[in-house]
Amino acid sequence: MVAGFLLGVFTPIPQVVIPLAVLLGPDTERGRIVGYLQAGLLLGIVCSRAYAGALAEWSGWRSAYWCSLGILVAVMVLLVRGLPSTSATRVGRRLSAVAPLDGGAAA
């Protein structure tokens, strides 16, 4: 139960990392950045199902949750250590695609 809870706490990482990567990268590379990250996420989803099934068959269904928790904690540590510090002005800038939705307010 604890592993399932912690797994749920850490699963929003992709929804945070993709927009952050887009904001940290150059404007001309936004599509490429999103493409690479989405491809990695989908490949991870496909491979994780097969891996979790094999792991559960070998050592029980709970082991898949514990292994997922360990991987997510490791990824979190790598992201905390590897991502650069960002200023509020850099992260706070708005994507140009959003500007038409709010009447063209300043970015």
Image (cartoon, rainbow, N blue to C red):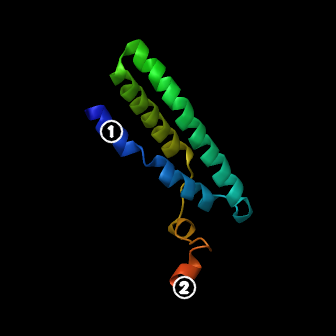
**Which quarter of the rendered picture does the N terminus lie within?**
top left
Q: Position of residue 84 (x, y in %)?
A: 57, 52
Q: Compare residues 44 and 92 and report the one nearer the observer.
A: 44
Residue at left 54%, top 86%? 103
Q: How many marks?
A: 2
In the image, 29: left or right of 66?
right
Residue visible at 45% across and 23% down in the picture: 53
- At a point 56% along the width and 71% down the height, the residue shown is 93
Q: Earlier along the polypeptide chain: callout 1 or callout 2? A: 1
Q: In the rendered view, tell whether residue 21 sits above or below residue 92.
A: above
The quarter in which the C terminus is drawn is bottom right
In the displayed structure, would residue 15 be above or below residue 51?
below
Does the image show residue 107? no
The three-letter code of the residue at mark 1 reads Leu
Q: Secondary structure at mark 1?
A: helix
Residue type at the position of mark 2? Ala
Going 36% across and 38% down the picture, which residue do you hit?
A: 7
Q: Position of residue 31 (x, y in %)?
A: 69, 58
Q: Quadrant of residue 11?
A: top left
Residue indicated by mark 2 = 105
SS for callout 2: loop
Q: Position of residue 44 (x, y in %)?
A: 56, 36
Label 2 crowd (10 A; few <14 / some 14-19 / many >=20):
few
| Left or right of residue 10, residue 24 in this image | right
Residue of label 1: 6
Tell me how far mark 1 sits from mark 2, CA to CA: 39 Å
Q: Residue furthest top?
A: 58
How many neighbours does mark 1 have within 10 angstroms: few (below 14), some (14-19), or many (20 or more)?
A: some
Which of these two is toward me, 92 or 7? 7
| 70 vs 54: above or below | below
Q: Give the quarter of the image for residue 3.
A: top left
- In the picture, the disc for residue 30 is none
